[in-house]
Amino acid sequence: DGSEVSEFTILGAQRDFYEHADGTMAMLVFDVRVVAGEDVAGEHLLEIHPDGSISEIWNIWDEVDYDPVYGRSFCHANGLDYDPESGQYHLSCHELNAIFRIDRSTGETIWRFGGDSWGIESGDFRDSEGGTRFLNQQHQFQLLDDGIVVFNNQSITQNFSIVLEYGIDWDDFTTELRWDYVSDPP
């Protein structure tokens, strides 16, 4: 159709990306480090600019102290969205049961939804009973003005996936489950 096609290779790029209006590509990329003699895969969020330069926006290694209980892929970033109005990314970490909101200009984590697993510090949101565990190996999500919808994979032993919608009060960081969908049969 006459469109120009460009191609570039980023070693370790995986699972999701976001294209900005100026052509900058934000993507999830493995950041493998050697821990106790073994390769451990974390992820970082990179931006590849139209001129070919690369900027690191955020890195899980700076956010969470690695513990061997996580295994050899301790973040498993699998969902990336961007809010142009706020200039902030949203990134899902499957193994940490958390979704992070990250400021594009500073790389600072603004909040973490979920994440009360594997002994890591709990997230920033609370339900009516003070709980912070809302997710279980989630994948993609959709932020709403007053909540979030999440495709929740569950664990392999549970052997089914569900959809969850949480209502969120963004002022006091409280949340409640609005509805869920569980397929029958799983």
Image (tube, rainbow, N blue to C red):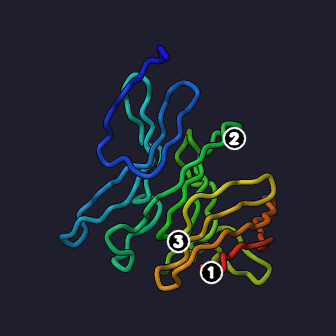
- Residue in front for this viewpoint, 122 or 153: 153
Nearest to viewer (mark 2 / mark 1): 1
- Tell me which label, 2 or 3, sits earlier in the chain: 2
Q: Counting other residues with Cα less than 10 Å from the Cα at mark 2, is it few (<14), some (14-19), or many (20 or more)?
A: few
Which amino acid, mark 2? Answer: Ser
Q: Residue at x 48, y 40 (%)?
A: 26
Which amino acid, mark 1? Answer: Pro
**Image marks 2 and 3: residues in contact by CB distance under 8 Å:** no
Measure the alpha-carbon separation of dots 2 and 1: 40 Å
Nearest to viewer (mark 2 / mark 3): 3
Nearest to viewer (mark 3 / mark 1): 1
Element class at badge 1: loop
Q: Quadrant of the C terminus?
A: bottom right
Q: Is residue 141 above or below residue 70?
A: above
**Which residue corresponds to mark 2?**
86
Q: Is residue 133 left or right of residue 50?
A: right
- Tell me which label, 3 or 1, sits earlier in the chain: 3
Q: Residue at x 49, y 30 (%)?
A: 24
- Residue in front for this viewpoint, 171 or 177: 177
**Which residue corresponds to mark 1?**
185
Which amino acid, mark 3? Answer: Gln
Q: Residue at x 39, y 68 (%)?
A: 74
Can you give x and y, in whole percent of width and height, for residue 180 in the image?
Answer: 73, 73
Asked where in the image residue 173 lies, by quadrant, the reply is bottom right
Measure the alpha-carbon separation of dots 3 and 1: 20 Å
**Which residue corresponds to mark 3?**
137
